[in-house]
Image (cartoon, grey):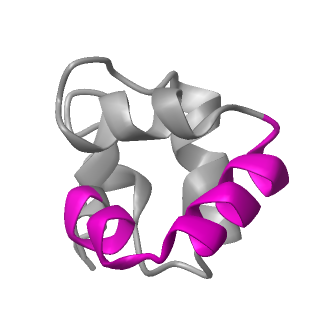
Amino acid sequence: MKFKTYYTALTPQEKTELASNLRTSKAYLSQIAHGHRQAGFKFAVRIEEITSGLCPREDIRPDIYTPYKP
């Protein structure tokens, strides 16, 4: 799932909780979701972990991470 799809579907309270869990602001997450800023490579991994894999790092930073191909 794209991070923008995931993030925009959240309620304001869920966005606050996500930002808190990621130790950042809702504004920064919004900027990432809407393409105004890029998540750092470690931050992309944290988003993937916090979302239980719903937002894979490959979708957040395809320039760094490539999809796994067995």
Where is the C terminus found, in terms of image quarters?
bottom left
Where is the N terminus found, in terms of image quarters?
bottom left
Majority secondary structure of magenta residues? helix
Residue 42 position within the rendered picture, expressed as x and y whole percent measured from the top left = 64, 31
Q: Within the magenta stretch, is there residue 22?
A: yes
Q: Nearer the viewer, residue 46 or 16?
A: 16
At 74% from the left edge and 64% from the top edge, which residue is drawn?
17
Residue 49 position within the rendered picture, expressed as x and y whole percent measured from the top left = 67, 66
At 49% from the left edge and 30% from the top edge, which residue is drawn?
27
Quarter of the image holding residue 54?
bottom left
Above or below for 47 versus 50: above
Q: Within the magenta stretch, is there residue 47?
A: no
Q: How many marks?
A: 0
At 72% from the left edge and 32% from the top edge, which residue is drawn?
24
Quarter of the image holding residue 33?
top left
Q: Is residue 58 left or right of residue 52?
A: left
Region of the chain picked out in magenta, as a range: 4-23
At 62% from the left edge and 73% from the top edge, which residue is drawn?
14
Q: Nearer the viewer, residue 70 or 14?
A: 14
Residue 61 position within the rendered picture, expressed as x and y whole percent measured from the top left = 30, 37
Q: Nearer the viewer, residue 52 or 9?
A: 9
Above or below for 44 versus 11: above
Residue 15 position within the rendered picture, expressed as x and y whole percent measured from the top left = 57, 61
Looking at the image, the residue that sits furthest to the front is: 12
